[in-house]
Image (cartoon, coloured by chain):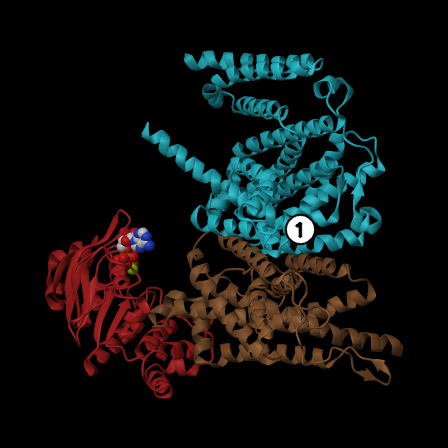
Amino acid sequence: MRLDRTRRRAPIAMVVAVVATVLSLVSAATTREGVALSIAFDLAIACVTTLSLPDLKSSHPVVSRAALTLLALDVAIFITFFLNSSTNFNLATGAAMSIVLLGLSFLTGASGQISLGNGAFMGVGAFAMAIWSNHHATTPIFLTLLIAVACGALVGLLLGLPATRLRGPYLAGMTLAFAVAFTFILSSFNSWTGGDSGLQLPTEATAPRWLDGFFHAGTSPLTTTTLYITDFSIIVAGVAFFFMANLFASRTGRAMRLIRDNDVAAELVGISLPRTRVAAFIVSSAYAALGGALLTLINNSVSPQTYSFALSVTILSLIVIGGIGTISGAVIGGIIYAFSTNAISWITTQTGLNPQGNFASQLNGIIFGGLLILTMLFAPLGIAGALRHLWSRIRSRT
Amino acid sequence: MITIDDLTVSFGAVQALRSVSFVAETAKITAVLGANGAGKTTLLRTISGLKEPRSGTIRMDERNLVHRRTEDIARLGIGHVPEGRGVIGEFTVEENLRLGAMMAKVNLQQGLSEQYEQFPVLGERRRQHAAKLSGGERQMLAMARALIAKPSVLLLDEPSLGLAPLVTAQLMHTIQSLCDTSDLTVILVEQNASSALRIAHHAVVLHVGKVVANDAASVVAADENLRQYYLGLVE
Amino acid sequence: MDPFLTSRIVTDVLGGLTNGVIYGMVALSLVLIWRSTGVLNFAQGAMPMFATYVGFALLSYHFGYWPCVVACIIAGLLIGGLTERLLVRRLYGKPEINPIVVMVGFLIVLEAVAAAIWSSFPRSLPSPFSSIDWQLAGKPIALSPFTVYEIATGLLVMTAVAVLFRFTKLGLQLRASAVAPEVSRLLGVRVGRLLTLGWMLSTVVGVITTVLVSSNFFTGLTPQVMDGIFAFGFIAAAIGGLESPVGAIIAGILLGIANQFVTDFVNQNAVIIIALALLIVSLMIRPSGVFTKRTERRV
Ligand SMILES: Nc1ncnc2c1ncn2[C@@H]1O[C@H](COP(=O)(O)OP(=O)(O)OP(=O)(O)O)[C@@H](O)[C@H]1O
Ligand SMILES: [Mg+2]
């Protein structure tokens, strides 16, 4: 009885939320003061939607995930309007990184295997983006992003096909070799990749006309562009998370988790191990490529030094600390990445280390490497796992 | 002599052995009998320290064996021929035997020739990989590998499994003569109750982890109830 | 055949042999640990690197090259043993990715700490052998006293490991603990100690490799000195089959020679790309390794 009512109510609430979002965006297009207000209004609507979430979750899981994503995006975009541009810039890179982390988290969560080369897959996307834009400047951004994703998936297929068929550490070792080889691959194609100096994008990503008022209204162009690119990155990340959440919950996702937990049983119920593992690996490299392409967009340029083996290792550290195999771990890892440079320089000044000294320059590695070991030994599911554990204890107490 | 007192072993909620007590005398064969899942293998693995008991004691002569490491227990002179034989297939016959002789203070060459004398097949195949031996040959290798170290206690887990009746009889004979000619204490776990009872001096019958009989082998063999309900020996 | 081409080929083979021996040793040390403890040690380059820095720290106290090498080996024994006891031991029986992640973390920490203490600038080691190629009829051949030192030491180490494993009591126990730990314990083998010993041994093989690599006048010792070599070592080990020490060595040597040909006839950048391609193709054709005998897996 109750369920029937909510089932009818839920889509209606959704439609209201969507309409409210669109309306508020349009109204915001006029003045900047309006922006904050309208988003606050929009937020309120989204909250109303979420109130019906518990019921929605069981009756329309996809709709409920969409609502959650919308809500999270609302909150995030709302916040960006109050931050300075360097923080926003950090947030944008964090959003791009969280997409990469999500892919890696999915790979491990789905197949029990791990990749040490996602920095290189990021690089594939980043360079695909830059190369394509330099040759076809008129292609819409979305299309260019998709092309970059396709390139990542293709390279993933090539490497994943032999390695994922094998048990043991073959995938890890092979992706490590790929990560080490990547800079050499880039310089082998100097004429395409711009050699050591990398590539610039032909045009800066700026807000489309109809959103002008939303981002402009009396602020400096620099702030505006950063704000636009930040919100754009956050939205792309939101879409990526939405798809992944659905994939996790789908039949394919369940099959993949069964493989991780018990591959013999999975094979007995007729799941093809190699095919599923390759699929998971392709998804993870495609996500890495998307993150890399977005990063090119954010930086307006791409440099081969960024995509060294060190980046792959950073990616691994972030997702392990955040919580490997979980969706929230990718968000946490992205946030850590966004602010890690600031945090580490803060530590340097607080401890009075010479910022130019050997030790300060290696602090990053020492802290991340150390956390990687400690997390794996004492909390294998990272911060996300610890939070989940805490939450279930609080819930069981009440 | 092995003295087991009030031994309880569990796997999580499953109690595999419940308060088991018995004594295996020196220079005697003690048969441990029971159906599948009775706890026989668990008993031997606990004696060897591969499984920690929940409570109870295991003593060899006067020494307590509980909480000792498996390798230390082996070095006290307890030879264990595990279920499924446990020969190392990647190793040659001779390498298996060399590994067995490693810990004991015996002369390797002399030990090898003794075992080859006792099990001539092994001598013929000394350079062959153990994986290529037949089931019965592997059983002999496992026995020889335990015996080469001159143990004072021998734990045998279903040595007759998968062997032809004639081979089983030979094997039982070998065990019997070993016991007669030395001070070897043998704990013989068997499904094949009749052949084990024929050579054993003493018998312990386990049923879902509990001792249901602990008596001279002849007495157990003659007990109609035991034969029918626990040993499955119905004429 | 064209005499110029012939001499070029000979030069490539000789030049490749040096690198090949190095890759073979890294691959061997990886296989030793993989077989005995089921861990692919991603810090197999970094641990020896650290030991080499520690050992050659004695240079500041006016010790010569050889005493420093001995100190490196002792440091390697300690690092290998402690790593197994304190870090790796907690990971046996855990999901496959746990040891991978921990050893990658260890790799980062070791490289960062080494750079923090000794800086990232290449440090040249006072090799007692000249790196200048010998001349034959006025033309340099790809052999110098230093490369002969490298090849000879490498072959010596490989032979020593082979003899240890094939013909000694200790080797028998090491092999037994690797393939059948439980049965070995029942026979009185102290498996725990042997696993530690296996890590110590493999780290020492790594230390000797690192000393050879960084004694090279043109490379020197840096915290990242083994990164690329580790990648080639893994490729060799995977091509040869992670289970087979002999396969690893052969694949390593062949890979080194192949690399030299690629450097000579294509270019330097293509080397790792072609190595990666070789790995992909070989895994497609023979997943269990090119040099392993095909045996049925027991269940
Ligand atoms: N590793 C284990 N984990 C959980 N339970 C176990 C384990 N090993 C044995 N058990 C349980 O302990 C009980 C005794 O097993 P055990 O292997 O000792 O029997 P057994 O008498 O040797 O049987 P069989 O004649 O079939 O070899 C059984 O119920 C079994 O399910
Ligand atoms: Mg049994």
Q: Colour of chain C?
A: brown
Q: Position of residue A318 (x, y in %)?
A: 56, 44
Residue projecting furthest to the front: A352
Q: Nearer the viewer, residue C258 or A121?
A: A121
Could you tell me which secondary element the residue under label 1 belongs to? Answer: helix
Is label 1 within 8 A of ligand 1 (CB to nearest ligand atom)?
A: no
> Hey, which quadrant is residue C219 in on the image?
bottom right
The answer to which of B225 and C278 lies nearer the viewer is C278
Residue A114 in percent (x, y) is at 56, 49
Residue B233's place in the image compared with B188, above or below, is above
- Amino acid type assigned to the residue bearing label 1 in the image: Leu
- Chain under disc 1: A
Ligand 2 in which quarter: bottom left
Image quadrant occupied by the C terminus of chain B = bottom left
Q: Is residue B22 left or right of residue A340?
A: left
The colour assigned to chain B within the rendered structure: red
Please give the residue where the numbered disc 1 appears in the rendered image: A159
Q: Residue at x 61, y 62 (%)?
A: C238
Q: Which chain: cyan?
A: A
CA neighbours of label 1 inside 10 A, class few (<14), some (14 to 19), many (20+): many
Task: Residue at 72% x, 45% y: name it.
Answer: A124
